[in-house]
Image (cartoon, rainbow, N blue to C red):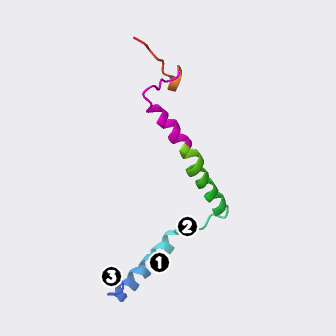
Amino acid sequence: MASHNRALTATLRSRLDQWLADTGAKFPVPDPQYDAARQAEVLHRREHEQMPQLEAEHARYLDPDWQPDADWWGSQVVYD
């Protein structure tokens, strides 16, 4: 739509810029402590180490012979 009505687009942009200035709006800035390599390492570890470990643990719950420990989530096994 902006390409079809350039005058209105310019007016609205000008009004927006003025409103942002009047309200003291803050704009996002890059985090100087952000480390992309570290983030990639964390995500890789989650995907290739932690998730497979959790999936294996959860798969054990589906085993027909699985029995909870006596203190599993604070529960008690009651045999009737």
In the image, which disc is placed on residue 74?
A: none
Q: Nearer the viewer, mark 2 or mark 3?
A: 3
In the image, which disc is placed on residue 28?
A: 2
x, y percentage for residue 79?
A: 43, 13
Q: Sequence order check: which comes first, mark 3 or mark 1?
A: 3
Residue span colored magenta: 53-69
Q: Please name the residue shown 49% across and 33% down the image.
A: 60
Q: Is residue 35 visible?
A: no
Type of amino acid at the residue the image marks with label 3: Met
How many angstroms separate mark 3 from mark 1 (CA)? 19 Å
Q: According to the image, label 3 marks what residue? A: 1
Q: Nearer the viewer, mark 1 or mark 2?
A: 2
Q: According to the image, label 1 marks what residue? A: 17
**Above or below: residue 44 compared with residue 13:** above
Quick check: 9 left or right of 18? left
Q: Please name the residue shown 52% across and 39% down the image.
A: 56
Q: Judging from the image, what secondary structure is the residue with disc 2 in?
A: loop
Q: Sequence order check: which comes first, mark 1 or mark 2?
A: 1
Type of amino acid at the residue the image marks with label 2: Pro
x, y percentage for residue 59?
A: 47, 37
x, y percentage for residue 53?
A: 56, 41
x, y percentage for residue 8?
A: 35, 85
Local crowd at mark 3 within 10 Å, few (<14), some, or many (≥20)? few
Is residue 50 or residue 71 the one in the foreground? Answer: 50
Q: Is residue 76 visible?
A: yes
**Above or below: residue 18 compared with residue 64:** below
Type of amino acid at the residue the image marks with label 1: Asp
How many angstroms separate mark 2 from mark 3 (CA)? 27 Å
